[in-house]
Amino acid sequence: MKTLLIKNIKSLLQVRDANINKVAGKEMSVLPKIDNAYLLIENGLIKDYGTMDNCPETADEIIDATGKFVFPAFVDSHTHIVYAGSREIEYILKVKGLSYEEIAKRGGGILNSAKLLHETSEESLYEQSLPRVYEIIKQGTGAVEIKSGYGLNTQDELKMLRVIKRIKETVPIDIKATFLGAHAFPAEYKQNPDKYVDIIINEMIPQVAEEKLAEFIDVFCDRGFFTIEQTERILEAGTRYGLIPKIHANELDYSGGIQAGVKYNALSVDHLEYTGETEMEALKNSRTMPTVLPGASFFLNLVYAPARKMIDYGLPVAIASDYNPGSSPSGNMKFMMSLALINMKLLPEEIFNAVTINTAYALNSSDKYGSITKGKYGNVVITKEIPTYEFFLYAYGSDLIDTVIIKGEKLVNS
């Protein structure tokens, strides 16, 4: 039995005695905390916490967090970390005036990543992707979702998912895999997109399920990508094989993807830059978590999802990084928090909830992560000495993480 005691914590954030799975609306502005606190982790799980008046005297390892804040490690519920090469040259084309869609029409974007991935061996793909996972751990992420979607044929999609599985077996954090064969249409199916949908349904999904390579299934339902009808066909097939739906929706237009996600009980609908009252009404009282990706809006200079309006409407909101080579080449969740503060006008308390408890829900892992709750994994971030927890978001370019602890093990001490 190994115990880790963190004592003299300036403030222990996101303390939830009851194991709630998400917060919505006005509840998002509440961030329960204990000042002058301790946290005890035993065998990788949160054992106890409270004020220093009741702090245990001994443990196998003790960390003095005087002047520092402690909160649950981030849960990043939307990434594309497994990819080959990079796409900085495309970004220069964007700087020169080309749009995301124009670059895609030239064979760039997702199709470029698919070409690079096809030419990359499984071993090289693993070696390129693994450092990105260690990078986000250092930046405070304690659980992450990784999608396929740069394969766009059966063998390459399976290659991606096998790499994700191998990374999952390598790194200390938990990883959930998402099958995203419906990320774009390969060039050879542009004139007959339904044939590619048939391949996804009849070839890819059965093999993904047979090898147990994914928990979720995702579709890019948006203007110029997969239609509502195609999306529904794919989700119906995926659910028959036990895959839980997620959707890329409304990044480029009012696509109907949000409503399709709600109809098929999607765990989350992600992006949501184009979201109005009709979409918010569809989401209200549903099981579907609206997930916004401010990194993509920042990098592509797009409109930001109306997260402020969503919360005011009574919805829950999750914030994820969308770490990928084309539209958000960063998995730094602290930076995503700052973007939400600066450009989405969310309150710090709402943002902390959006990157912990609500993203844990969007990862189908509310019972394991997202709050300081007895019995959950001891995944926590210890800040450097800072004046307030609001400062963590305010100082958007500063490295303010001192230590990352995953399942009771100290992994980073900068």
Image (spheres, rainbow, N blue to C red):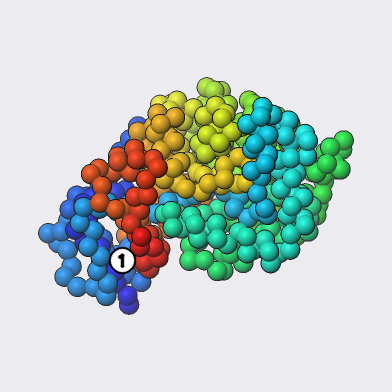
Q: Where is residue 375 in the image (x, y as percent from the top left)?
A: 35, 62
**Above or below — where is 242 with respect to 92?**
below
Q: Which residue shows up at 57% across the image and 62% down it? A: 130
Element type where label 1 sits in the image: strand
Q: Which of 309 and 109 is in front in this view?
A: 109
**Above or below — where is 268 with respect to 46?**
above
Classify residue 132 as left or right of residue 348.
Answer: right
Q: Where is residue 81 in the image (x, y as percent from the top left)?
A: 59, 53
Single out the residue that lies furthest toward the bottom.
Answer: 1
Q: Which residue shows up at 42% across the image and 51% down it? A: 74
Q: Can residue 244 be seen in this view?
A: no
Q: Position of residue 326 (x, y in %)?
A: 64, 42
Q: Based on the displayed image, in which of its 4 quarters is residue 206 positioned?
A: bottom right
Q: Which residue shows up at 49% across the image and 27% down it? A: 306
Q: Based on the displayed image, in which of its 4 quarters is residue 183 positioned?
A: top right
Query: Which amino acid type is marked by label 1?
Result: Ile
Classify residue 1 as left or right of residue 157.
Answer: left
Single out the residue that lies furthest toward the top.
Answer: 277
Q: Is residue 40 visible?
A: yes
Q: Which of 376 and 68 is in front in this view?
A: 68
Q: Which residue shows up at 72% across the image and 34% down it? A: 103
Classify residue 120 as left or right of residue 296.
Answer: right
Q: Which quadrant holds the C terminus? A: bottom left
The residue carrying mark 1 is: 41
